[in-house]
Image (spheres, rainbow, N blue to C red):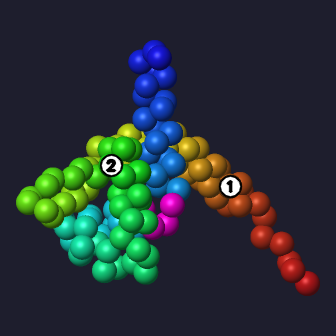
């Protein structure tokens, strides 16, 4: 696989991980609460621990979280670098929409006010 293929595969894993609401909520919990043990994260979800562990595995493989073992406990930490890559990828689209909305605003400003009656 080429270097570009590796980067694309990494991006695909990140977007696939972000496509799930449970995984996005895990990221929010880690962002707002800092590193947390899996037991604390599990308290926020109505699912069995193996299901949450699967979500955490997907996030770990996408590079969005890291895991540190402390005895029998597993502590999860948000890894934000892949999110910066997503933001970099989305930036041209943000610029496109901002420019399009500015153009629409300019057009509306140039239109004469009509009498609605």
Residue named by callout 2:
60
Residue occupying the far bottom of the picture: 117
Specify the farthest residue to the top.
2
The image quadrant that residue 45 belongs to is bottom left
Q: Is residue 7 magenta?
A: no
Magenta residues, as a range? 20-24
* Overall secondary structure of the magenta section: helix
Residue contact at pointers 2 and 1, CB within 8 angstroms: no
Residue with the mark numbered 1 = 104
Say if 12 sits above or below 55 in the image.
above
Residue 84 visible in the snapshot: no
Q: In this rendering, which labeled residue sits more in front, label 2 or label 1?
A: 2
Q: Secondary structure at mark 2?
A: helix
Residue 36 placement: quadrant: bottom left
- Front-most of 88 and 11? 11
Image x and y of residue 94, in percent: 52, 48
Question: Does label 2 or label 1 sit earlier along the sequence?
Answer: 2
- Nearest the camera: 21 or 38? 38
Decide if residue 98 is on the left or right side of residue 7: right
Query: Closest to the observer: 40 or 78?
Result: 40
């Amino acid at each position: 696989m080429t270097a570009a293929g590796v980067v694309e595969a990494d991006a695909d894993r990140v977007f696939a991980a972000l496509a799930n609401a449970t995984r996005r909520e895990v990221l929010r919990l880690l962002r707002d609460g800092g590193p947390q043990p899996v037991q604390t994260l599990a308290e926020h979800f109505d699912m069995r621990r193996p299901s949450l562990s699967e979500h955490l595995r997907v996030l770990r493989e996408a590079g969005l979280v890291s895991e540190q073992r402390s005895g029998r406990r597993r502590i999860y930490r948000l890894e934000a670098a892949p999110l910066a890559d997503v933001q970099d990828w989305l930036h041209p689209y943000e610029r496109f929409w901002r420019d399009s909305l500015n153009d629409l605003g300019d057009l509306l400003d140039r239109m004469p006010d009509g009498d609605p009656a």
